[in-house]
Amino acid sequence: MRGPTPIEALLTIDLAAVAANWRLLRDMHPGGAVAGVVKADAYSLGAARVGPALRDAGCRHFFVAHLAEGVALREALGPEPTIAVLNGFAPGADEDAALLPVLNGLPDVGAHAAAARRRGRAAPAILHLDTGISRLGLDAREQEAVAADPSRLGGLDLRWLMTHLACADEPGHPLNAAQAERFAAICARLPAGIPRSVANSSGMFLGPAFASDLARPGCALYGINPTPGRPNPMRQVVRLDAPVLQVREIAPGDTVGYGATWTATRPSRVATVAAGYADGYLRALSGRAFGVFAGQSVPLIGRVSMDLIAFDVTDAPPIAPGAAICLIGPENTPDDVAARAGTIGYEILTSLGNRYRREHRTT
Ligand SMILES: *Cc1c(COP(=O)(O)O)cnc(C)c1O
């Protein structure tokens, strides 16, 4: 016997695919380690589940953006793996979580070095050098200051020198080579022997000049294509199925949804589905997306509203309340949905709402 029909949508996250994606990247990068970037709750897929799955696949280094994400991830991962915090944190703020701060400017360097000297114990950290994205990281003047006076780094136990590429997903962009050159030049003027970390997901596909001692892929682990415009080498991870609440017959001339933007031109069947922009099914998809039911594509009609969307199921096999329409899946991947919304797959994933029931599959 089945229980009552669930009225919430089901977001299925394939942890075996995440692990397979990580192993594929690791095998591509035999000269260095491959981390897992699990910031923003592993791009909304659940860092508490994704983190341990990556650890069990052999991943030893993790990146988050916020201190709180790092503290929570430490709970999930146990004491062994490195957990680095991209946005940094004040000395001691990680308490017992043993997190690795990314030092993004001279003030960070000064604060952590001074704290280490006070404690009489070297402070592990990552030094972030900006080579062209102009976001975080020591800028050219700060880099000059450190190269001219390496004693500023005294007290720090620098585990990696890091930079971040601005245009890794555009292999032909001249900034990629420029950043690699600037990074090599500044690293050569800093204390020797510190391992380096350069590539994000797309950066790993740019060739040996971008290989480093520690790659930092995020999106590719979650099935986003790191090589836009070329076939996606990654396995799909996410599937979103949303329940049909009602099916109604409408007549030619009837309209669907706010603003009456869709008008039936023939007797039509409309399936109303429980998902909307409050769940991260972006309003920009209005009239531009499709779902899949019984292997058949069904067009999204009218505007996406907060909690509801409508599909034209006139030409689909019979469909009844309780059936599910696939909003993200093999035929409509996060990258496909993103293209229809005018955004990127990252935003589709990180927008996935918390009203979905998340099911993490391990096989
Ligand atoms: C988010 C992030 C990554 C991962 O990027 P992807 O494009 O998702 O692989 C790597 N490094 C830094 C500094 C980041 O902010």
Image (cartoon, rainbow, N blue to C red):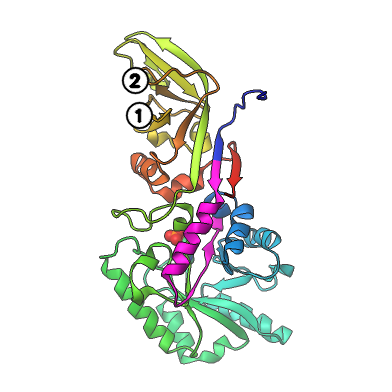
For image coordinates 50% across by 88% down, the residue present is 193
Residue interval drawn in magenta: 12-40
Q: Are marks 1 and 2 in contact (CB under 8 Å)?
A: yes
Three-letter residue code for mark 2: Trp
The image shows residue 68 at horizontal and vertical percentages of 65, 59
For image coordinates 39% across by 79% down, the residue present is 183
Of the pair 25 and 244, the residue shown nearer to us: 25
For residue 155, side relative to residue 289 (left or right): right
Residue 54 lies in what quarter of the image?
Answer: bottom right
Of the pair 219 and 306, the residue shown nearer to us: 219
Residue placed under numbered mark 1 in the picture = 287
Residue 10 lies in what quarter of the image?
Answer: top right
The image shows residue 153 at horizontal and vertical percentages of 56, 86
Residue 158 - label: none
For image coordinates 51% across by 72% down, the residue present is 104
Residue placed under numbered mark 2 in the picture = 262
> 322 above or below 113?
above
